Amino acid sequence: MTQVDFYVLPDTTLEARLTFACRLTETIQRKGYRLHLHAEDEAMAHQLDELLWTFRADAYVPHALAGSEMASQVPVVIGWQGPPDPAEEHPQAMLNLHPEIPEWFSRFERVAEIINQHQEVLRAKRACWKTYKDRGYPVKAHQLAGQEGRG
């Protein structure tokens, strides 16, 4: 059964949420997981693509946008439209930055959700928490105090 982890940030900005998403992506990738980074839309996917190159000067996270030539060759694929392409190696984890839970989330061993203190994000992710719990999935919260949004 899919394990769901919610990471709760004290910050309110989208920038802090995306920077933490990059840090978490690096951690997940270092642990050897193949990751599907699920963005809200194409603009966020491109923003994450750029940010993964710059969020930390000494970081390198091999990644590509879904549908690109490199997507089948890297451990982190950034998508926004649907489930991972069958041509890509099966990712074991998903980092969901979309306000809603994708219908296909249960194909992953692990799902991570990031909550910050922005009211729209709080509202959307509370609904996600309730949905996961109502369906019987194991859900765990990680309160992150003192995050500065930088790696």
Image (spheres, helix red, strand yellow):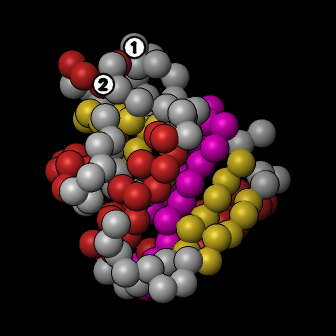
Mark 1: secondary structure: loop
Q: Residue 133, can we see it?
A: yes
Q: Residue 48, can we see it?
A: no
Looking at the image, residue 146 sits to the left or right of residue 2; the answer is left
Residue 35 at x, y = what percent?
Answer: 47, 37
Q: Residue at x 39, y 13 (%)?
A: 87
Query: Which one is in front, 19 or 137?
Result: 19
Quadrant including the C terminus: bottom left
Q: Are marks 2 and 1 in contact (CB under 8 Å)?
A: yes
Query: Is 142 placed above or below 51 here?
Result: below
Q: Which residue is mark 1?
A: 87
Q: Which residue is mark 2?
A: 71
Q: Residue at x 54, y 33 (%)?
A: 32
Residue 41 at x, y = what percent?
Answer: 28, 52
The residue under label 1 is which amino acid type? Answer: Ala
Quarter location, residue 64 = top left
Quadrant including the N terminus: top right
Residue 56 lies in the magenta stretch: no
Residue that sits furthest to the front in the current view: 58
Mark 2: secondary structure: helix
Q: Residue at x 66, y 37 (%)?
A: 109
Looking at the image, residue 78 sits to the left or right of residue 51; the answer is right
Residue stretch in magenta: 99-120
The residue under label 2 is which amino acid type? Answer: Ala
Query: Is 124 placed above or below 35 here?
Result: below
